[in-house]
Image (cartoon, coloured by chain):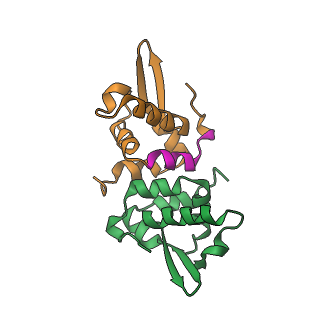
Chain colours: A green, B orange
Amino acid sequence: MLHPEREQIALEDVLAALGQPVRLDVVRRLASGAEKFCSEVVQGVPKSTMTHHWRVLREAGVIRQRPEGRNVFVSLRRDDLDARFPGLLDIVLNDRTDG
Amino acid sequence: MLHPEREQIALEDVLAALGQPVRLDVVRRLASGAEKFCSEVVQGVPKSTMTHHWRVLREAGVIRQRPEGRNVFVSLRRDDLDARFPGLLDIVLNDRTDG
């Protein structure tokens, strides 16, 4: 399960990862910074679809996934994103024009 | 040639439009706010590919296109984007981590 290092995180990948309703919703649900089970973050989306979304978010450097036993934990890479693109995550998390 | 009204511009659409290297480059080339010919903004990208990129940017509300005679002019919808998502465009235009 590969994660880009902080300095490898690219703006275009982060924007593309966030530019999708389910993924944007996931990021907002992880906004507190707390680690959660992947399975508890989103309901009602097919497992194969979520596997794709998790990969896009992970490979863009937006989330960190951590397998433990039969579970996979997930958290937002808030520190890394704030360091790379100051203000971006705040805009995304605070925006409510679409909801 | 349809353009969303300011209040119809959705964050996820803007992020998706910006999350692609050619389109991100286009937006940066339009950063001055000046209207340009579409054909002078980007070179070396096939016309059919650019037609797609212009449409994605236009339908997301990122750019405005204006046909005049045989030319199409294009400009960044900076005021609209700044009003909708304050700070977002500044982050995108100022980031140089990927270049």
Q: Quadrant of residue A52?
A: bottom right
Q: Is residue A47 left or right of residue B27?
A: right
Horizontal and vertical percent position of residue A8: 33, 65
Visible residue check, residue A35: no
Is residue B82 shown above or below B77?
A: below
Residue A15: x %, y % from top left? 46, 54
Left or right of A69? Residue B98 is left
Q: Residue at x 32, y 67 (%)?
A: A7
State which quadrant residue B9 falls in: top right
Q: Is residue B79 magenta?
A: no
Q: Which residue is depicted at the point 65% across and 74% down?
A: A39
Between B74 and B79, the one nearer to me in the picture: B74
Residue sitting at 54 percent across and 76 percent down? A74
Q: Which residues are magenta?
A: B8-19
Q: Position of residue B28 (x, y in %)?
A: 35, 42
Give the answer, above or below, for where B6 lies relative to B87.
Answer: above
**Residue at the farthest front position:** A48
Q: Name the quarter where the N terminus of chain B is drawn.
A: top right
Q: Residue furthest right?
A: A44
**In the current view of this chain or complex, which residue is farthest to the top?**
B69
In the image, is residue B9 part of the stretch drawn in magenta? yes
Residue sitting farthest toward the bottom: A69
| Residue B1 is at least partly visible in this image | yes
Q: Nearer the viewer, residue B28 or B21?
A: B21
Q: Main secondary structure of the magenta part?
A: helix
Q: Nearer the viewer, residue B85 or A34?
A: A34
How many marks the image carries: the answer is 0
Residue B65: percent from the left, percent from the top? 47, 26
Relative horizontal placement of residue A38, taking residue A90 as reference (left or right): right
Determine whether B3 is above or below A63 in the image. Answer: above
Q: Nearer the viewer, residue A30 or A53?
A: A53
